[in-house]
Each structure stands twice: as C-alpha cells, then as structure tokens.
Image: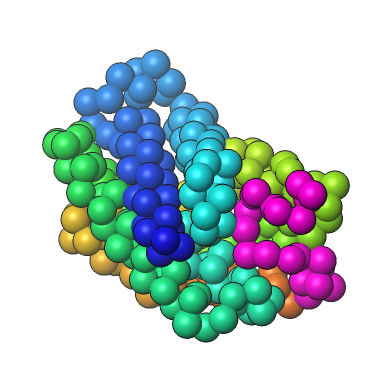
Amino acid sequence: QLYLSEAAGTALLVLGGLSAVIFMFGAGSPMERLLPSVDLRRTLTGLLFGCVGGSIALSQVGKVSGAHINPAVTMGFWLMQKLDARTALGYVCAQLAGAVLGSLPLLAWGAMGRSVDFGATVPGDGYTTTDALLGEIITTFALVAGLCIFIGFRELRRFTPFLMPPLYGVMVPLEAALSGTSTNPARTFGPALISGRWDGWWIYWVGPFAGTVAAIVVCSSLARRIEVAKLYHFESDRR
C-alpha cells in the first residue's frame, strides 16, 4: 500500500507538473504570446509545480505514504532514521516507476511536448557541469531544509504542503537556466526515458542527494522533533 501510494503520487506530480512546463514553454503554446517574459513564465511554472506537489501531500497519498514523491526526500527521512533502509529503497523504486507512468501520458502533447523534450531537465546552454550540479545541490538543500523546519516545529506542520508553491515559485526563475530545477531524481528520470535526453543525468542524482545530506546535517537538531516520515496528516497532532 505504501509503495502503490508513492507510485501514484509521483505519477501525478510528473504528469501535472510537466504538463505545466510543456504548456508554458512548448512550441506553439499561446503562453509565449500572452506572457513574453521567460522569467514570469518560469515563476508561474514553479508555482504550479509546487501546487501540484502540495496538493498531493494533502491528498490520500499524504495520508498513506507521506507523499515523499521524491527520492531525495525519502533519503532525508532515512538519514533522520524515520525509515528503515528496506522501506526507503522500496519508496525510491516506487517513485521511479511512478515517474515513468506519469511521463507516458505526456506523449499526448505531441509536437508541443517534443519541442521541450517533454519537460526533461538538462544542463543549461552556456553553463558548466559544475554550475548545474551546484544549482541542484542548493535548490534541493532549500527544499529539504524547508521541510525539516516546517515538520520540525509543531506550529508549522499543518502548513508544510503550502511551502511548495512559493518555494518553487522563487527557485525556478532563479535556477532553471542552470539545470532546470529538478530537485528530484524521479522527476528527471521519467521525461528522460520518453525523450531520450540523458545529458548530464548523473547531476540529477548526485546534486539532490548531496543537497539532502547537507540539509540534514545543518538541520540535525530538528531530527528529534520529527516523528513520522510524512509531509502532512500527522496523527500525533490530531489526538
């Protein structure tokens, strides 16, 4: 049940989040004419992506499995000893499978989707591999550290899902040119598989995992405050 929930949640994240990317930036989309500013479209895309992720955390997925929907988040909970290694590995496998399932319907976008490689993340033109790697480390650090702060303080826990839209709304316009602002190996894996774009694929594993480790080290004092590996539906807060 846990793994099916994670697979379904990740599929929804990839399908919804990357549909927003395609609609905002795909060739032939009316958004280029309506919103000529690339930065504004990136901001809206980040907000929409965050809304999808936050909504999944609020849903039944969040209740059943915690709505990690990201191997980096699962790794963070494992490092905090809120998940055992076997369960964490099962989560990651489920997330990757869900990312593939969520990417397949993106093919229905046709030429518009192909023009942006169905939302695949690749290092940006004019930037080095180091730039892209640092971008993924920093943005994933911000994600995981933010989750630690919100989940670690009881007064903030109920607002954890609402962190996602403003966080990605800020990070995407600032960092997307470097690496595409993945922060999520599963989110990168799905569209890479259907588009064949594997440029710098290792960046989207090493960067998020390094950012997660750094965030857990910095936020280690909050670990004992975190009771369960969930982003919402904290049973202890509803007694």
Residue in view at x 64 percent, y 49 percent: 232
Quarter occupied by the N terminus: bottom left
**Where does the magenta region start and end?**
219-239
- Residue 127 image position (x, y, % from top left): 44, 61
Residue 180 appears anywhere in the view: no
Q: Would you identify the image quadrant in which residue 17 lies? A: top left
Residue 195 at x, y = what percent?
19, 55
Whether residue 140 is situated above or below residue 80 in the rendered picture: above
Q: How many marks?
A: 0
Q: Is residue 74 left or right of residue 121?
A: right
Q: Magenta span has 30?
A: no
Q: Residue at x 17, y 43 (%)?
A: 107
Please identify the residue farthest to the front as the structure is shown: 239
Q: Is residue 110 left or right of residue 234?
A: left
> Residue at (83%, 55%) from the top-left corner?
153
Q: Indicate whether residue 228 is drawn in magenta.
A: yes
In front of the other: 131 or 141: 141
Work out whether 16 lies above or below 224.
Answer: above
> In terms of depth relative to the viewer, which is nearer, 161 or 72?
161
Q: Nearer the viewer, residue 10 or 48?
A: 10
The single residue placed furthest to the top in the displayed view is 34
Q: Nearer the viewer, residue 211 or 125?
A: 211
218 left or right of 135 in image: right
Q: What's the residue at 21%, 42% (across, down)?
A: 105
Q: Is residue 109 above or below residue 150?
A: above
